[in-house]
Amino acid sequence: MRKSRAVGAAQHPRRRSRRAALALTVGTAALALVAAGCASNSNNNTPTTGGTAIKGGTAVFALPPSDTPNYIFPFTSSSFISITNLNDFSYLLYRPLYWFGQGTQPTFNNSLSLANPPTFGTGNTVTITLKHYMWSNGKPVTAQDVMFWINMMQAVPQDWGADVPGGFPTNVTDIKAVSPTELTMTMKQPFNHTWFLYNELSQITPMPAAWDKTASGPSACDTTVKDCSAVYTYLDGQSKALNTYVSSPLWSIVDGPWKLSAFNADGHVTFVPNKSYSGPVKPKLAAFQEVPFTTDAAEYNVLQSPSSGTKINVGYLPEQDAPAKAVSAAVGRNPIQHLGYTLAPWYTWGISYYPMNLQSTDGDHAAIFKQLYFREAMAYLMNQASVISGPLRGYGKLTVGPVGNYPATTYLSPQGKAGDPFPYNPTKAKSLLSNNGWKVTPGGTSTCVKPGTAAGDCGAGVTAGSALSFNFVYSTGTAWIQQELEQLQSNSSQLGIKLNLSPKPFNQVVALGAGNCVAAHISCAWDMADWGLGWSFAPDYYPSGETLFTTGSLANASGYSNPTNDAMINQTLTSNSPTALYAWQDYLAKQLPIQWQPNGAYQITEVSNNLRGVLPQQTTLEINPENWYFVKS
């Protein structure tokens, strides 16, 4: 959910949205490189574990450019769902019911989950049994705390950034806490058990009884659905009061390994260990800090100047400063190896894209975007290979459709493995326009000269004289994103397509363009938006597409609606065979509900050699600083 940096905003776009998406959540430091010699990978290898541990110490983590935590409540709306808000912030404090990610594989992690794996019985019944976890106020995490989240989801589904119409919990019945440690429900039909765990139960974050209140006093959302709307309104409002996070009696009740000791709205955050944490891995550090930067260049200035006053232990290289790497190499030469850092690209289990708003209120732009030939033309103008070898300098993967191609999984179809479905081809792009009623004016602005719906016409809703001129907002602070879009702008101008680029902070781009504007009841006055990393598959880890692409889903940023697509997605939810998943993704890859772009490394991470436990980095983009510890140099 993440948007990139989007909780695939999700995220999560699961966006940093899911880094928002999620969006998912969700834009960020994705990178790669061109030129300059490569060295063997051994130059960058240091132990990831072992060594003589030093008790305590403060590890400093650099946040992505222009992307800071600004929402603490883990029931996160599409406007706030992102990797930074979930993975880098609230998940450290409030653990989801089920945890995903083991090394580089985006798989279920039983050891870090609050509950045992669900058991599926006869009659489509599902039983969830909680492990022994405690809230920091001394209360146990109970089945009723799980019901608190589920009831809120029933009451205000539109306020959950990963909501899908017809999805959980409306696809189950007889939900009840049968004991303090056991909850049961019945699926309305037989579902793929992997999908149900990875995409439905994965969304739940238990919430403490102390949060079940309104401004007027205690409420009963954990047992009474009708009470939940007012509780949500209260908690959402409290979550927007950033200056109260540390002092709030609400947010101080945690069940994760960390608790807040300092929070500044500019992005400076300090966590200290939650001494009541019940999980298997207790924090070894005395503190964990997150520090903000307005640009990747500003972060790199601090990273390479350890005497400046701030020592970054986990940071990142901007793509423009990263070493070129050979095609077969994992990394290139590390430019700050001499300062005691190990270089490690961080790739996400996700896809990258920018949406065209099929619900735009700007003239007849929505009608233009709904024409498949126009979306195809724009796809042929995005030179993914050039962006990877140029601005990304080698640290990127092709986006080949709605299913990610890294890491290697059984989810990607043979057609997806074949590569880019729309390799750069401006000649094809020009033909698509001229053969469908447009007067192509290179260097100017192309216009519709054959309105109508017959073959060769501009298409339904496109009026005579309509111009191919669109506003395009994108996230500031990361150079490769700007360079990619300037390249796309130049390619498009050769066919008379004018892209009016408008840089904005990541959080603003995510709030504007990472969610379905009609479903979320927000402004649709935008045409195109790019927060940088599209979507990471979280909290929906099985890439079946219902979160991003079904009609009306909140994370369906473009507002795409296609009955054939909806039916094919529904097939993936019930079938345990990969055939349905392959058929759907092969179909949608060429329908272009969104515009595929390179999936750059989430970031090119630099890790202090005296800090262990950071590597390998999880492709689900979770971080586990409770695993980190310093060693003697």
Image (cartoon, rainbow, N blue to C red):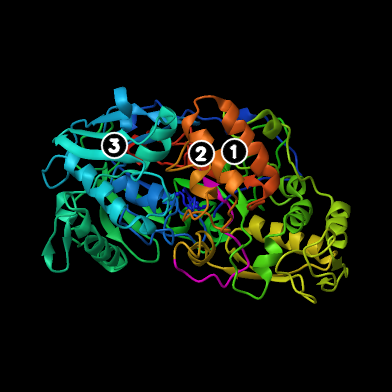
Residue linked to disc 3: 284
- Which sits in the foreground, 592 or 263? 592
What percent of the width, then of the height, locates residue 183?
Answer: 21, 34
Q: Nearer the viewer, residue 285 or 218?
A: 218
Name the residue that disc number 1 marks: 404
Q: Point out which mark residue 155 bears.
A: none
Residue extent of the magenta highlight: 521-536
Q: Is residue 605 left or right of residue 538?
A: right
User: Does 207 sit left or right of 68 as displayed?
Assistant: left
Image quadrant holding the C terminus, namely: top left
Disc 2 residue type? Asn
Mark 3 vs mark 2: give the one in front: 2
**Do residues under tags 3 and 2 come within 8 Å of each other at their CB atoms?**
no
Number of dots carrying numbers: 3
Q: Which residue is the site of mark 2?
A: 570
Circle 1 sits in a helix, a strand or a loop, which is it?
loop
Q: Does residue 126 appear to the left or right of 299 in the view shown?
A: left
Q: Tell me which label, 2 or 1, sits earlier in the chain.
A: 1
Label 2, secondary structure: give it: helix
